Image (cartoon, rainbow, N blue to C red):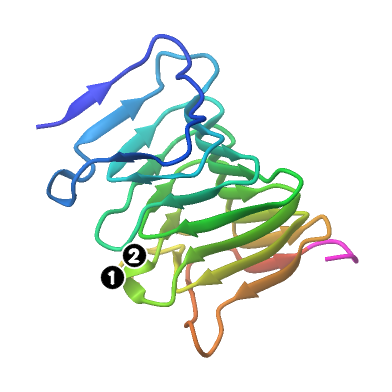
C-alpha cells in the first residue's frame, strides 16, 4: 500500500552534498510526501548536489521541489522517476547561484500547477528530458508546462508536453514552453537528441521579450 507523510511544519533544507532520496523502482510512487497541512513551505528544499527518485510529492504551497545555488541535481532518471502534482506556483522551481546549476530532470510525471518546471534567472547546464525516450518527462495540465525566465543554457529533449505516453489523450497546458526575460541558449529538441511532443496545448512554444 501507500505510505503517506503529512508534515505539520516545513521540511528542513537539504545542504549535504551527495544526498540521495530514493524509493526503489519496484515501489516507485508509493511513498507520498503531502503538504496539504501546510500554509507555506516546499516539499524538498535543496541546496546541495544529489538526487530525488521514486517519490510522489503533492500539495505543497510554494513548490514540490526547490533547487537553489550552484549544485548538480538529478530529479528522476530512466526507470525511476517522480510524480509531482498540485504544488504551489510551480511543481519544480530552480534558482542558480552566481555560477551554474547543472544536472537532469528526467522521467517524471508533472501535473496540475501554475507551472510544471520554472527556471529562474542564471546559468545552467541542465537537461529536461534526455536523448533517450526513457528519459522523457510528462508535463500536463498547467498554465505553463516549462517556464524559463532569464535562464541560459537549458536543453529540452524528448518530453511529452500536453499529453501522456499514448500521445492521444488531451491534457494540455495553456502554454507548453515559455521563454522570457532574456532567456538564451535554449535548445528545444534537435536532430541528434530528438524532438519533444507538444500536443493539445493552447500555445505550444511562446517567446516573449525582444531580448529573448
Which numbered dot is residue 166? 1
Counting from the top left corner in percent of width and height, residue 137 is at 41, 61
Residue 170 appears in which quarter of the rendering?
bottom left
Q: Residue at x 65, y 40 (%)?
A: 69
Counting from the top left corner in percent of width and height, residue 140 is at 44, 55
Query: Is 9 in front, or is 70?
Result: 70
How far apart marks 2 and 1 lie (CA) works out to 7 Å
Where disc 2 sits, the SS reads: loop
Quadrant assignment for the N terminus: top left
Counting from the top left corner in percent of width and height, residue 97 is at 71, 43
Up-down relation of residue 174 to residue 130 (above or below)? above
Which numbered dot is residue 169? 2
Residue furthest toward the top? 8
Residue furthest toward the front? 17
Q: Chief secondary structure of the magenta span?
A: loop
Please tell me how crowded label 1 is: few (under 14), some (14-19), or many (20+) other residues with Cα within 10 Å.
Answer: few
| In the displayed structure image, the side of residue 117 where residue 123 appears, left or right | right
Up-down relation of residue 47 to residue 207 (above or below)? above
Up-down relation of residue 97 to residue 186 (above or below)? above
Residue 59 appears in which quarter of the rendering?
top left
Residue 55 appears in which quarter of the rendering?
top left
Query: Is 127 in front, or is 29?
Result: 127
Residue furthest toward the bottom? 191
Mark 2 and 1 residues: CB-CB less than 8 Å, in contact? yes
Magenta stretch containing residue 135, yes or no? no
Please tell me how crowded label 2 is: few (under 14), some (14-19), or many (20+) other residues with Cα within 10 Å.
Answer: few
Amino acid at each position: 500500500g501507500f505510505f503517506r507523510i503529512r508534515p505539520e511544519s516545513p521540511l528542513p533544507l537539504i545542504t549535504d552534498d551527495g544526498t540521495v532520496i530514493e524509493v526503489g523502482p519496484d515501489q516507485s510512487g508509493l511513498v507520498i510526501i503531502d503538504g496539504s497541512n501546510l500554509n507555506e513551505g516546499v516539499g524538498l528544499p535543496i541546496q546541495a548536489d544529489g538526487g530525488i527518485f521514486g517519490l510522489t510529492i503533492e500539495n505543497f504551497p510554494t513548490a514540490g521541489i526547490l533547487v537553489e545555488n550552484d549544485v548538480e541535481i538529478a530529479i528522476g532518471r530512466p526507470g525511476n522517476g517522480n510524480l509531482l502534482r498540485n504544488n504551489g506556483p510551480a511543481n519544480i522551481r530552480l534558482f542558480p547561484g552566481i555560477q551554474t546549476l547543472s544536472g537532469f530532470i528526467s522521467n517524471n510525471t508533472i501535473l496540475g500547477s501554475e507551472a510544471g518546471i520554472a527556471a529562474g534567472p542564471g546559468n545552467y547546464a541542465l537537461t529536461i528530458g534526455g536523448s533517450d525516450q526513457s528519459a522523457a518527462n510528462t508535463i500536463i495540465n498547467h498554465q505553463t508546462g516549462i517556464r524559463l525566465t532569464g535562464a541560459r543554457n537549458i536543453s529540452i529533449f524528448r518530453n511529452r508536453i500536453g499529453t501522456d505516453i499514448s500521445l492521444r489523450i488531451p491534457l494540455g497546458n495553456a502554454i507548453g514552453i515559455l521563454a522570457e526575460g532574456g532567456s538564451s541558449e535554449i535548445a528545444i529538441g534537435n536532430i541528434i537528441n530528438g524532438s519533444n511532443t507538444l500536443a493539445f496545448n493552447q500555445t505550444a512554444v511562446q517567446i516573449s521579450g525582444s531580448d529573448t
